[in-house]
């Protein structure tokens, strides 16, 4: 059972480039989330999805896009990368009907924009 | 009103000490309060969670205390060990809500010295 898998683990982008951060989960969780983590700022929600074909903005969505074509996958797209997008990105999933009710996080993608 | 305020930002204790991390929330609709533990290079992992129907919850050496009237909750780590050194995040959400979105605190970096 792999849980939540994120790729790549590290990436350096030049300003203006674009990339997709991949996230896949094998737990059949309906809900998926993208957070960014910056020092001293905690975790900020970028986008979330409550099921295939359904996505919505979180607290800091500008400069990002998402899609959810399957239950398993929830990629995050960065268009026109900017230095302000240098961060660690975490994907998470949850199954609220479960007794646990908690999030399962991936191991993160560390992105640097130069 | 969506904020969760966490303190202190960092904490150093000796082995066997009892570090205490505090969080405060504003939104009275929140009724689910988890704590996450994050080791360097890893994603956060659910540690313990509480709902407002109880004032305290213990799991092993970890205890959550909850004060509904003050809108505050705290994490206590009994007999702390060097292996507890990590970043701890509190969070809040509406249990059973349509999205299960968690609002995270800014994190506390805990160092337990041998």
Image: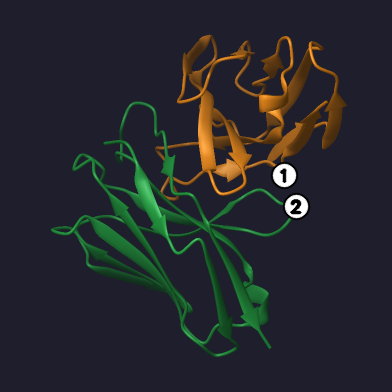
Chain colours: A orange, B green
- Horizontally, residue B87 falls left or right of residue A18, namely left
**Depth check: B16 or A51 in front?**
B16
Q: Residue at x 72, y 31 (%)?
A: A86
Q: Position of residue A91 (x, y in %)?
A: 63, 34
Q: Residue at x 48, y 36 (%)?
A: A95
Q: Position of residue B53 (x, y in %)?
A: 19, 58
Subunit under mark 2: B
Q: Position of residue B82 (x, y in %)?
A: 66, 80
Q: Position of residue B114 (x, y in %)?
A: 68, 88
- Which residue was labeled with disc 1? A107
Q: How many marks?
A: 2
Subunit under mark 1: A
Q: Mark 1 falls on what kind of element?
A: loop
Mark 1–mark 2 Cα distance, whole angstroms, equals 7 Å
Above or below, B105 relative to A44:
below
Quarter of the image with the N terminus of chain A in it: top right
Cβ atoms at labels 1 and 2 below 8 Å apart: yes
Q: Residue at x 53, y 18 (%)?
A: A61
Label at residue B24: none
**Depth check: A47 or A31 in front?**
A47
**Depth check: A92 or B5 in front?**
B5
- Horizontally, residue A111 falls left or right of residue B12, namely right
Above or below, B88 relative to B103:
below
Let me know if residue A68 appears in the view.
Answer: no
Label at residue B41: 2
Mark 1 or 2: the one toward you: 2
Q: Mark 2 falls on what kind of element?
A: loop
Q: Residues within 10 Å of mark 1 (few under 14, many from 20)?
A: many
């Amino acid at each position: 059972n792999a849980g939540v898998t994120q790729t790549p683990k590290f990436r350096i982008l030049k300003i203006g480039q674009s990339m997709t951060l991949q996230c896949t989960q094998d737990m059949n969780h309906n809900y998926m989330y993208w957070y960014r983590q910056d020092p001293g700022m905690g975790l900020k929600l970028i986008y979330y999805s409550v099921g295939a074909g359904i996505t919505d903005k979180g607290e800091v969505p500008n400069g990002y896009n998402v899609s959810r074509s399957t239950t398993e996958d929830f990629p995050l797209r960065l268009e026109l990368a900017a230095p302000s997008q240098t961060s660690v990105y975490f994907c998470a999933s949850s199954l609220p009907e479960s007794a646990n009710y908690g999030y399962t996080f991936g191991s993160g993608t560390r992105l640097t924009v130069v | 009103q969506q904020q969760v305020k966490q303190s202190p930002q960092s904490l150093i204790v000796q082995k066997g000490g009892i570090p205490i991390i505090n969080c405060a929330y504003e939104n009275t609709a929140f009724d689910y309060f988890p704590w996450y533990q994050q080791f360097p290079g890893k994603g956060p992992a659910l540690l313990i969670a509480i709902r407002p129907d109880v004032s305290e919850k213990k799991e092993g050496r970890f205890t959550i205390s909850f004060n509904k009237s003050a809108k505050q909750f705290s994490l206590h780590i009994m007999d702390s060990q060097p292996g507890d050194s990590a970043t701890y995040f509190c969070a809040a959400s509406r249990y059973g809500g349509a999205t299960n979105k968690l609002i995270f605190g800014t994190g506390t970096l805990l160092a337990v010295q041998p």
